[in-house]
Image (spheres, rainbow, N blue to C red):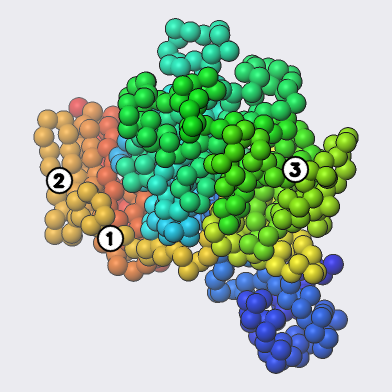
Amino acid sequence: AIDSETTAEKRDPLFSRIPRRDFMKAGAAAGAMGSLAGCTGLLSDDDDDLAAAGDVDSYVPPGEHDDYYAFLSGGHSGEIRVYGIPSMRQLMRIPVFGRESARGYGYDDRTSEMLEDAGGYSWGDTHHPRVSQTDNDYDGRWAFVNDKANGRMARIDLEYFETDAIVDIPNQQGTHGACCLLPDTKYVFGVGEFRVPMPNDGQDLDDPENYTSTIAAINPETMNVEWEVLVDGNMDNGDGSKQGRWFFATGYNSESATTESGMSASDTDWVKAFDVPAIEDAVEAGEYEEINGVPVVDGTRDSPLNSGDRPIVRYVDVAKSPHGVSVTPDNQYAIASGKLDPTATVIDIEQLAEVDDPNDAIVARPSLGMGPLHTAYDGRGHAYTTLFIDSQVVKWDIEEAVEAYPDDEPEDGDQESPAVVEKIDVHYNPGHLIAAESYTADPQGDWLISLNKLSKDRFLPVGPMHPENDQLIYIGDDEEGMKLVKDTPSYAEPHDASIVSADKLDPAKVYDPEDYDEEYIEPDASDIIREDGHVHVKMHSQRNEFGFQEVTVQEGDEVTFTVTNIEQTPDVLHSLAIPEHDVNIKLAPQETREVTFTADEPGVYWMYCAFFCSALHLEMRSRLIVEPA
Ligand code: CUK
Ligand code: CUA
């Protein structure tokens, strides 16, 4: 294998990076590059060798941009990370469910009120970042992500790359799966994993048979929960079909058990297929019970709404404790991974609408390997499934699996399907994997990231908590096969990701004050307003001063600072930090933030700017003088 970190082109600044597709076409250019790169043995005049070198060209030279954004969840760190692909450089972190001091997130009044209104928890557990789409393609507006810990869904504004809304989903605990109903992101679905009494108000505690879980349909514009559907068994991951009708959720506890052995007792569980228009009709017709302000529709197997011609939820039998489910780019199949079974179950979406027995819509069940968890797509008819136990990614041909079924059904369950194309080792124990634009109708088919739970010995040891390992794999060449390109240590714990072409996002470089309610404070509008124990300081900030050199308040005063960074120049950030008062707000160019605190200790406090903004950054400070009462 070629060591991607030491190839000549990576050291040679003249070797400009050319997208591989162009590289393959540009024979003359390739020849020129061969000579520029010098003789290293890695690049020869032989076209095949050049192509092989091109396969692993993931180098992004200093100053150049990546081809893709990847949004990775941060698990119980409660955040989202933004990587550039293929460099795997971490470009940004977006705090979502927890306070984060570099951004002042959860410190200014607006974001701390948002976190407070969303339940006031200090953390969350993000798993599934999904980017909004229009016409089955990324539209650059929002990303959504679940909070498995506290049953919430958050929205990230992709103009500013910041969390702008969080909804605390009623009747749902352990919101796990998260995804959009396509083609146009009509709903964001939150999938409840933990079965609880409904309502969970302490009246009915120890009757696990009657616990239920729900899916919640959230309006992406208002973040309002429009309706929920309760089901038998629990639910795990989910994915929406691309033509608006179906939403699929896996579940691993059809047993309604409360212990591990109980939850994995049965040989089969379900994929639940929610017929969204049929559910909307039921809501419209008033066939629901309102629980905690949300219309809740009964989607259990015995529900009258499941007995007619058009059941609202179809229960498809799948092998033991499935985990991931994802819809193919062409909207033809939903593929669920077996987790405790070596197979994936392929459900034909069109047939699902036609057959009487939903099990008749199963059109393939390839045996892939041990511990299949999640599946991504390259747009060329292949599926890529992580094998948690085998520590591999398996590439397989979807149509071949359909053709081979049911003759390929193994007697003993461990005979590999003829649809398997190849397997690649990953390091180690992958959870999700994600291919470029795999969640759209048109995946790019070049890069894939395997999000591995364990790194073991792959990096310098850093204590008993090891980094995880996000591995970049090139999948663009079906003949050469998958190529492992790089290891990227990551902090706990990415679950899922979405990879979006860079040209589909257009983030702002400075704030537009019109986008926020806060009052923009011009230099001549600086003011200190005092009334009844409350002091409101309005001031600007710019290199290298705040609007006031000193501000005097009385012990016990409640103090509000409204501060605007009046800079127009991108990347010149200021902040307002006040020692010993837990005050810390970030001020990007043209941004206004407000912060309120109580000045309860007499003394002198140097308010300062925490972003290194110029040579006089250290001098950018003012005194807060708190006089004894
Ligand atoms: S889950 Cu974590 S590896 Cu939350 Cu999609 Cu499968
Ligand atoms: Cu402003 Cu440092």
Task: Name the residue at 48% across, 8% down.
Answer: 204
The spot of residue 378 in percent (x, y) is 65, 61
Please tell me whether residue 580 is drawn above or below residue 621 in the rendered image.
Answer: above
Q: Nearer the viewer, mark 2 or mark 1?
A: 1
The spot of residue 323 in percent (x, y) is 66, 37
Query: Which image quarter: residue 396?
Result: bottom right
Locate residue 513 relative to residue 413 in the image: left or right.
left
Give the SS element for disc 1.
loop
Q: State how far apart marks 1 and 3 are (Cα).
A: 52 Å
Q: In the rendered structure, which amino acid carries the disc numbered 1?
A: Asp
Please report whichever mark, 1 or 3, sits nearer to the chain's N-terminal start: 3
Task: Name the residue at 35% across, 58% down.
Answer: 588
Number of the label disc, if any, that sits on residue 365 = 3
Q: In the rendered structure, which amino acid carries the disc numbered 2?
A: Ile
Q: State how far apart marks 2 and 1 are (Cα).
A: 25 Å
Count residues near mark 3 (Cα–Cα under 10 Å), then give few for <14, some for 14-19, many for 20+: many
